[in-house]
Amino acid sequence: MPRTLDPELRRALAARIRYYNEMGIYDFYRRPVSAHAEEVALPIAVDEEEFATSQNTFEPGEEMSPRKATAVAVPVEENIFEVIALKPEQSVSNPVKALKIIREDLGDCKRCVLHKQGRKQIVFGVGNPKAELMFVGEGPGADEDEKGEPFVGRAGQLLNNMIKAMGIEREQVYIANIVKCRPPGNRTPEREECATCSPFLMRQIAVVKPKVIVALGAVAAKTLLAMNASMMQLRGRFYDFKPAGVRSNDPNWDGCKLAVTYHPAFLLRDPRQKGEAWKDLQMVMKELGMKAPKSNT
Ligand code: SF4
């Protein structure tokens, strides 16, 4: 039977970890589990297993029927066992330099199998390093792989139009993907690949410090929010978001809002959903105090 932590104990542990974080201590190690310690260690192991299982079902397509969804969309609980290590870019205040450090750290990345499945280059991210608005997609396609920039193909054109409809230019936002290498045949990235690559995206987010992130499609939403739910359940609301495993060097930035909308590639396949996507973007615009150009209102 799975065991869960007593809520009181959970709160006490969270408070203790926050206390250590405030003292500048971010790395925690678990002792090897002895026979005596097993009872204490078990709830932690169970939590990790539950977390792994909850992310395990990326299903193709943008919509799952509510019956197939395995969990109701709820905000992610604070992960009290999260290990936050200091990253080299955190001592750098210039976001351009900080992003460069992350890119250098990524190097000629071979951390997941996507490096040997036909990628031409790593597609890191593009745009304003101080953007208030950030778009996160799933992964590069053929055009992006060719040019080394996210969202430059047909879906990219549509994303540009969506950004323009909001009354801003592509250069004003920051755009990145969950995985930075093209999955072969434009398949959906595997959970393992998302988990391996997304820590670099989390670091990019902590540097850019957006006010709002728009997750484009189910893979981006599920990875960022660490939850499994249908697009229908995920859209239409804001989530409080903090990049996992990393913190910003700006004490005034304590995370941002995250909204979910359809991936532009899905909207190309089903243009009837464009109106729904526009509703999502209008919600974002309201949050950012933006006004659409007259022609869109
Ligand atoms: S997808 Fe990410 S983790 Fe995998 S090889 Fe490319 S850069 Fe590395």
Image (cartoon, grey):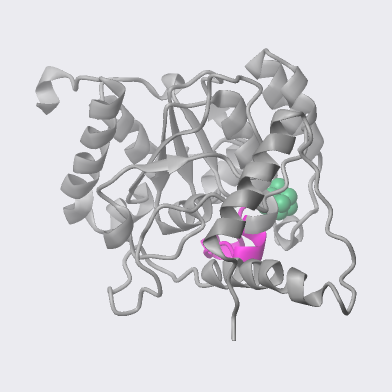
- Residue displayed at 33% across by 42% down: 238
Task: Please give left or right for residue 189 compared with residue 98 in the image.
Answer: left
Residue 69 image position (x, y, % from top left) = 36, 73
Q: Is residue 189 magenta?
A: yes
Q: Tally the numbered discs.
A: 0
- Residue displayed at 70% across by 22% down: 98
Among the 4 quarters of the image, the one containing residue 43: bottom right
Q: Find the residue positioned furthest to the front.
A: 8
Q: Is residue 71 magenta?
A: no
Among the 4 quarters of the image, the one containing residue 289: top left
Q: Is residue 193 above or below residue 41?
A: above
User: In this view of the protein, which residue sits in the foreground, 281 or 257?
Assistant: 257
- Residue displayed at 41% across by 58% down: 218
User: In this view of the protein, which residue sits in the foreground, 221 or 268?
Assistant: 221
Task: Please give left or right for residue 231 compared with residue 28 in the image.
Answer: left
Residue 179 in sight here: no
Among the 4 quarters of the image, the one containing residue 292: top left
Q: Is residue 36 above or below residue 243?
A: below
The quarter of the picture where the C terminus appears is top left
Residue 163 image position (x, y, % from top left) = 32, 29
The quarter of the picture where the N terminus appears is bottom right
Specify the segment rendered in magenta: 181-194
Residue 38 image position (x, y, % from top left) = 80, 76
User: In this view of the protein, which residue sits in the foreground, 80 or 201?
Assistant: 80
Residue 106 in sight here: yes
Q: Find the residue positioned furthest to the top.
A: 94
Residue 161 image position (x, y, % from top left) = 29, 32
Task: Please give left or right for residue 66 compared with residue 144 in the image.
Answer: left
